[in-house]
Image (tube, helix red, strand yellow):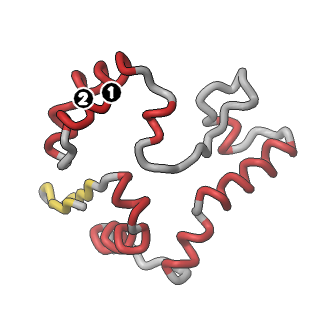
């Protein structure tokens, strides 16, 4: 996780892979950057926001059929099988994006990815 300050505005740049690998440590850094004190122990906060807990909440809201955060923000509301909460795993893109789509993304965002510490050449070779 990279931390920086721009004027008086705190900035925290994190990588999804780091959040998945060490959520408690990474969220502790985020909370410190933004001076947040959780009302619950950090481990409890993470448990409430785990992919399994969020998927359970999404299932309950879908079963009710009412507008909800999950229903309103689904990627494709016309397809009920499309979920807001997906697998929540690093590198999941490999099972859903074609090599051409990965190459397009790397062409557009490769510079930013390199600044965030990603090995863009390795992503190109894996595509």
**Dot 2: element:** helix
Disc 1 to disc 2, C-alpha distance: 5 Å
Residue toward you, 10 or 113:
113
The image quadrant of residue 127 is top left
At a point 12% along the width and 57% down the height, the residue shown is 7
Q: Left or right: where does residue 53 sit relative to residue 34?
A: right
Residue toward you, 88 or 127:
127
Q: Of all residues shown, which one is farthest toward the top?
A: 100
The image quadrant of residue 48 is bottom right
Q: Left or right: where does residue 35 sit relative to residue 45?
A: left
Mark sitting on residue 124: 2
* Residue 98 x/y as whole percent: 43, 21
* Residue 41 x/y as whole percent: 52, 83
Instruction: Count residues near mark 2 (Cα–Cα under 10 Å), then give few for <14, some for 14-19, many for 20+.
Output: some
**Dot 1: element:** loop
Screen quadrant of the N terminus: bottom left
* Residue 96 x/y as whole percent: 50, 29
**Circle 1 is placed at which residue position?**
127
């Amino acid at each position: 996780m990279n931390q920086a300050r721009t004027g008086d505005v705190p900035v925290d740049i994190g990588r999804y892979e780091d959040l998945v690998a060490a959520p408690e440590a990474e969220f502790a850094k985020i909370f410190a950057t933004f001076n947040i004190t959780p009302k619950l122990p950090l481990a409890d906060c993470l448990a409430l926001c785990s992919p399994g807990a969020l998927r359970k909440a999404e299932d309950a809201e879908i079963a009710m059929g009412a507008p909800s955060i999950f229903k309103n923000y689904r990627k494709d509301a016309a397809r009920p099988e499309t979920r807001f909460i997906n697998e929540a795993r690093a590198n999941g893109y490999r099972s859903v994006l074609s090599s051409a789509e990965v190459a397009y993304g790397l062409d557009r965002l490769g510079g930013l990815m390199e600044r965030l510490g990603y090995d863009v050449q390795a992503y190109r070779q894996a595509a």
